[in-house]
């Protein structure tokens, strides 16, 4: 095997990467502080330190398992004052490592993922994206299962006996809820998951397309949690089938709210009730359930997040001739991850920026077009993005026979008692360190707290909440 020093040099890096930006890194620590993988893996991963190593000793970095531990959430990029795209820098290095036979460090990275991150199969597919480094997904998943089985055998006989006290209720079974169930079940706590849907998985099952997350993979992860002893109650909607306060009456000493963000935001324009207009969450859920869907030939998707992109790609895959995403801001402000945007365009989806809908037009009760207006960006708004404003006289009409609305999702928290404080945007307020709500003994995490975010962020919140719940139960004598 060729020595890595002859494969890549500092000069090559400078030609391929935006080194001028890197030279002026502010060393503010945002990339490390905002990285969920840094928290989940502790000393095993430091994006800022890895960046330094790339430029000081690229030959050693190629043989480092740290390269494989970026989760592609782009939090470091979105918050960095220099807008450095660390995931893409690491992707470049990973491809070089793969091309020259550096597989052992990758296997060591998988070991760390299995040891430290619940739902390792889901996380690898949805967050780490091994195919982007030219790796065979099926072989990667097979390796993860081998590692997990080996670790499970090593721990066999050392599993704690279920405690009589310390019952924990988990509302919702998305990645945050499943993580809490995993962490507490394996430590011997009596855990019950309450899920409104017929099957566990939350947004993992409801919205992520089959080609990105096969349901058999999700089912394996859920079965591993069931095997730890977690109790499951599906088709139970807290607030309808069961009152929130009843959970305490059933001797649950702690409660975790992981209800997700399943409520579609409403687009307040004329024509939203026409046939052929659907909400992205409903569309993806029906597709994932195997329901027969009437797909238009010319689809317009309104929105700029990952859900909008998934909906557009899914519509094309199901027979649409053309799918176009309309987003009212520019690519820099788009909430979807940069790689997802590129991948979506590569799949044939068109994206039109600085365009907003004014009215959905119809014929005979069915959507036939969208009246749009061009936008221009002004001053920064409360989100830190430039505010879009309509350009006078720029109206135009786009023909369509299907409109998918993907303008955002919000949690439905009407079931919560008034003692639990909510933020102005309708999410649950929590102590950012402990994840405890304003009601003692009640914790929350995932999209119910952050609004729509990534799977790895929800897992990070779930691990933090599980640790706090354990501390709470010990301190309260539960």
Image (cartoon, grey):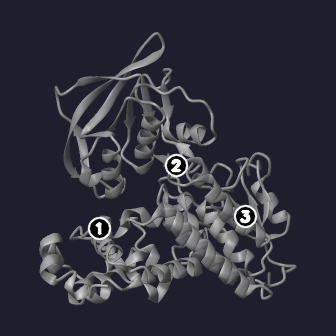
Nearer to us in this view, 415 or 401 = 401
Q: Which of marks 3 and 2 is nearer the N terminus?
A: 3
Q: In which quarter of the image is the N terminus?
A: bottom left
Residue labelled with disc 2: 410
Where is residue 137? Give x, y as percent. 49, 63
Q: Residue 38 location, x and y as percent?
A: 44, 80
Name the residue rendered at 41%, 25% in the picture. 297
Tell which circle, 3 or 1, labels the residue nearer the N-terminal end.
1
The residue carrying mark 3 is 223
Mark 1 lies on residue: 88
| 226 lies left or right of 291 | right
Q: Name above or below for residue 185 compared with residue 429.
A: below
**Proximity of marks 3 and 2: CB atoms separated by less than 8 Å:** no
The residue lying toward the viewer, choosing from 171 and 320, is 320
Dot 3: few (<14), some (14–19), or many (≥20) neighbours within 10 Å? few
Which x, y percent locates residue 187? 73, 82
Q: Of the residues under marks 1 and 2, which one precedes in the sequence?
A: 1
Q: In this view, does 309 lie above or below 275?
A: below
Residue 133's image quarter?
bottom left
């Amino acid at each position: 095997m060729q020595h890595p020093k002859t494969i890549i040099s500092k000069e090559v890096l400078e030609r391929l990467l935006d080194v001028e930006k890197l030279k002026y890194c502010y060393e503010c620590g945002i990339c490390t502080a905002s990285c969920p993988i840094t928290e989940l893996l502790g000393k095993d991963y430091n994006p800022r330190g890895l960046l330094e190593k790339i430029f000081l000793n690229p030959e050693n970095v190629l043989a480092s398992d740290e390269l494989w531990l970026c989760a592609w959430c782009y939090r470091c990029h979105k918050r960095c004052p220099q807008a450095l795209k660390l995931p893409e820098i690491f992707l470049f290095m990973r491809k070089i490592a793969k091309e020259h036979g550096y597989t052992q460090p990758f296997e060591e990275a998988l070991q760390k993922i299995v040891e430290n991150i619940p739902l390792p199969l889901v996380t690898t597919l949805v967050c780490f994206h091994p195919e982007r480094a030219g790796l065979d997904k099926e072989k990667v998943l097979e390796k993860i299962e081998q590692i997990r089985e080996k670790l499970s055998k090593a721990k066999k006989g050392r599993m704690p006996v279920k405690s009589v006290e310390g019952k924990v209720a988990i509302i919702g079974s998305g990645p945050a809820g499943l993580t809490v169930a995993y962490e507490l079940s394996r430590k011997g706590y009596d855990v019950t998951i309450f899920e409104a849907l017929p099957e566990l998985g939350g947004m993992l099952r409801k919205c992520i397309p089959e080609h990105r997350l096969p349901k058999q993979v999700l089912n394996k992860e859920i079965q591993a949690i069931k095997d730890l002893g977690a109790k499951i109650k599906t088709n139970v909607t807290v607030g309808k089938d069961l009152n929130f306060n009843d959970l305490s009456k059933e001797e649950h000493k702690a409660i975790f709210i992981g209800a997700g963000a399943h409520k579609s935001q409403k687009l307040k324009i004329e024509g939203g009730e026409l046939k052929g207009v659907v909400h992205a969450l409903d569309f993806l859920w029906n597709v994932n359930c195997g329901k027969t869907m009437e797909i238009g030939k010319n689809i317009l998707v309104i929105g700029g997040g990952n859900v909008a992109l998934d909906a557009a790609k899914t519509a094309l895959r199901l027979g649409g001739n053309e799918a176009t995403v309309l987003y009212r801001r520019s690519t820099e402000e788009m909430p979807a991850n940069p790689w997802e945007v590129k991948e979506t365009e590569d799949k044939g989806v068109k994206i039109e920026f600085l365009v907003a809908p004014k009215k959905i037009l119809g014929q005979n009760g069915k959507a036939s077009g969208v009246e749009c207006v061009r936008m221009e960006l002004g001053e920064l708004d409360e989100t830190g993005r430039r505010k879009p404003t309509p350009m006078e006289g720029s109206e135009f009409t786009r023909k369509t026979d299907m409109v998918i609305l993907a303008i955002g999702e919000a949690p439905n928290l009407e079931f919560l008692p008034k003692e639990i404080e909510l933020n102005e945007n309708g999410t649950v307020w929590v102590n950012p360190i402990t994840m405890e709500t304003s009601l003692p003994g009640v914790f929350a995490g995932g999209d119910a707290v952050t609004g729509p975010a990534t799977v790895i962020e929800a897992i990070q919140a779930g691990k933090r909440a599980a640790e706090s719940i354990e501390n709470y139960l010990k301190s309260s004598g539960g």
